[in-house]
Image: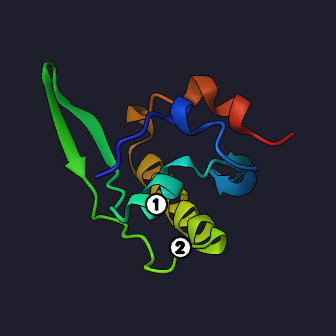
Amino acid sequence: MVAIPPEISMGLGPQHTVKLLGKDVSMLLGSSWVSNKMQVPIIILHTEMTEKYKIKITFEDPIYPSEIQNRQNIIDESTHVFKKIDKIIRNNPYSWCGYDTFDKMMIK
């Protein structure tokens, strides 16, 4: 499992763009780069409040790296990660904590 906070992956490699919530945002490749390099899956987890003091933690299905390590496969894996994140946010918009940094991710 690769668990990388976004701030760690921010400087790895040139940035590409992807749609997130209908906006063009910088697609960072750090998590996918580590996943490919170490040949371990990326597992997205997200949380939501179910009651006053109860949190439900959901682990999404693993995203396995390609056996062939090249830049295009890293980009494809990152795109897949962002598509999954987009779907999670759209299904649970109230539980996403990234709205405060979303404007910094957008390509203007």
Q: Is residue 100 above or below residue 46?
A: above
Q: Nearer the viewer, residue 13 or 101?
A: 13
**Residue 19 rendering spot, x and y as whole percentages:** 68, 56
Q: Nearer the viewer, residue 26 or 14?
A: 14
**Residue 24 rendering spot, x and y as whole percentages:** 75, 51
Classed neighbour count for the residue bearing mark 2: other residues with Cα under 10 Å, few (<14), some (14–19), many (≥20):
some
Name the mark on residue 106. none
Q: Amino acid at mark 2?
A: Gln
Q: Which residue is mark 2?
A: 69
Q: Which residue is mark 1?
A: 37
Q: Nearer the viewer, residue 32 or 58?
A: 32
**Residue 1 located left or right of residue 78:** left
User: Disc 1 on helix, strand or loop?
Assistant: helix
**Residue 87 rendering spot, x and y as whole percentages:** 46, 57
Q: How many marks?
A: 2
Residue placed at 64% from the left, 33% from the top? 102
Q: Is residue 53 above or below residue 55?
A: above
Q: Amino acid at mark 1?
A: Lys
**Residue 58 located left or right of residue 44:** left
**Residue 74 located left or right of residue 56:** right
Residue that lies at the very extreme toward the bottom in this rendered image: 68
The colour scheme is: rainbow
Where is residue 46, by image quadrant?
A: top left
Label located before the other in sequence (2 or 1): 1
Quadrant (top left, top right, bottom left, bottom right) of the C terminus: top right
Q: Is residue 53 above or below residue 95?
A: above
Residue placed at 27% from the left, 35% from the top? 48
Where is residue 75, by image quadrant?
A: bottom right
Distance Cα–Cα, label 2 vs label 1? 7 Å
Residue placed at 42% from the left, 39% from the top? 4
